[in-house]
Image: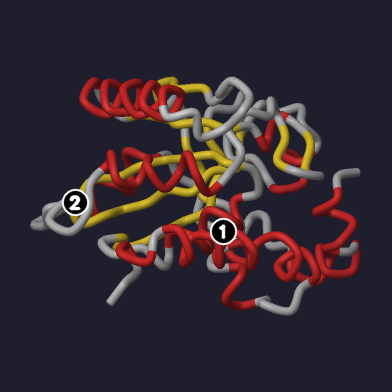
Amino acid sequence: MVAKHLWIGIGFLMATGCAGKRAKHEYTKKNSQKQESMNTDTAILAGGCFWCLDAVYRQMEGILSIECGYANGKIKNPTYKEVCSGLTGHAEVTQLVFDTDKTNYAEILTVFWKIHDPTTLNRQGNDVGTQYRSGIYYHNKVQEDIALKSREAAEEAKLWDDPIVTEIVPLDCYYSAEEYHQDYYTNNPDQPYCVAVVGEKAAKFRKLFADKLKK
C-alpha cells in the first residue's frame, strides 16, 4: 500500500467512491466539444499523484480547465481502485485545456520539468507504482516534437542530477477519474497528503513561476 492511500484512509474511500456514476469517455469524444470556437489546445501529463499537477496548473495563466484522469492503460473505464492496483497499466494524469493566446505547450512543459521529479522511474516520493510514472502523452506530431525538444533542453540545463526517465508517447486512451478527485486540493486543503505533498508543490510553483500566475 503506497503512502497516499494510507493517508486517505479506508473510510474516506468508502464514503466518496463513485465508480459507475462518473462520466467515462475517451479524449476524442470530449475534446472536440471543448475546442469549438476557441483558440485552445490540450495537454495530458503524468507526474505522480494527479492531485499535485491539478493543484499546480490551476494557478497558471492561460489554463482554462483541468481534469484528473487515467491514460494509456490496458482496460476500458478503469476505477481508481483498479488503477491503484498497478495492474491496469494506466498512469494518473491531468488533462489541461489551455488558451493558446495566453500560453502554449512549450511553456506548460517548462513548468512540468521543474514541478515534479522526472528522474525517478515509476514513483514520486513515497508514491510508488507504474500509475505514478512521469509521462507526456501527445496528440500529434507537433506536440511530439515540442515534447522531445523540451526534454532535451531540460537535460542540457541539468535541472536534475540524474537522467530524465519521462516517457513521451502517443495518447492511446484517456478516461476521466471519479468526481471526488477533481480539484481535490481546493476541496480538501487540510487532508494530510495535501498538507504534506500537494500544498508544497503548489507553493513551489508560485515561487518558481510568479510570472505565470493567473492574474
Mark 2 residue element: strand
Q: In the figure, residue 142 lies in which quadrant? A: top left
- Quadrant containing the C terminus is bottom left
Judging from the image, the colouring scheme is secondary structure
Q: Position of residue 31 (x, y in %)?
A: 29, 47
Residue appearing at x 53%, y 43% in the figure:
93
Q: Position of residue 165 (x, y in %)?
A: 58, 22
Depth order, front residue of 160/125: 160
- Could you tell whether 71 is left or right of 215 in the image? right
**Quadrant location of the N terminus in the rendered image:** top right
User: Mark 1 belongs to which amino acid?
Assistant: Arg
Question: What residue do we see at 89% from left, 64% from top?
Answer: 9
Contact between labelled residues 1 and 2, with CB atoms less than 8 Å apart? no
Q: Nearest the camera: 120 or 21?
A: 120
Q: Which amino acid type corresponds to the residue marked 2 in the rendered image?
A: Thr
Residue 92 relative to residue 45: left or right = right
Which corner quadrant of the image does residue 29 belong to?
top left
**Closer to us: 41 or 154:** 154
Vertical order, 11 against 82 (above or below): below
- Residue 106: where, in percent of width, then height? 28, 39
Task: Please state the horizontal and vertical placement of residue 10, each as a whole percent of the image.
Answer: 90, 62
Identify the residue position indicated by label 2 in the image.
40
Binning the other alpha carbons within 10 Å of mark 2 as few (below 14), some (14 to 19) or many (20 upward) gives many
At x 37%, y 40%, the residue is 109
Instruction: Provide the residue designation for mark 1.
Output: 22
Question: Which of pointers 2 and 1 indicates the residue nearer the eye?
Answer: 2
Q: Label 1: how many residues lie within 10 Å, few (<14), some (14-19) or many (20+)?
A: some
Residue nearest the viewer, comparing 20 with 44? 44
- Marks 2 and 1, the one that precedes in the sequence: 1
Query: Spatial distance from mark 2 to mark 1, Cα to Cα?
Result: 25 Å
For label 1, the SS is: loop
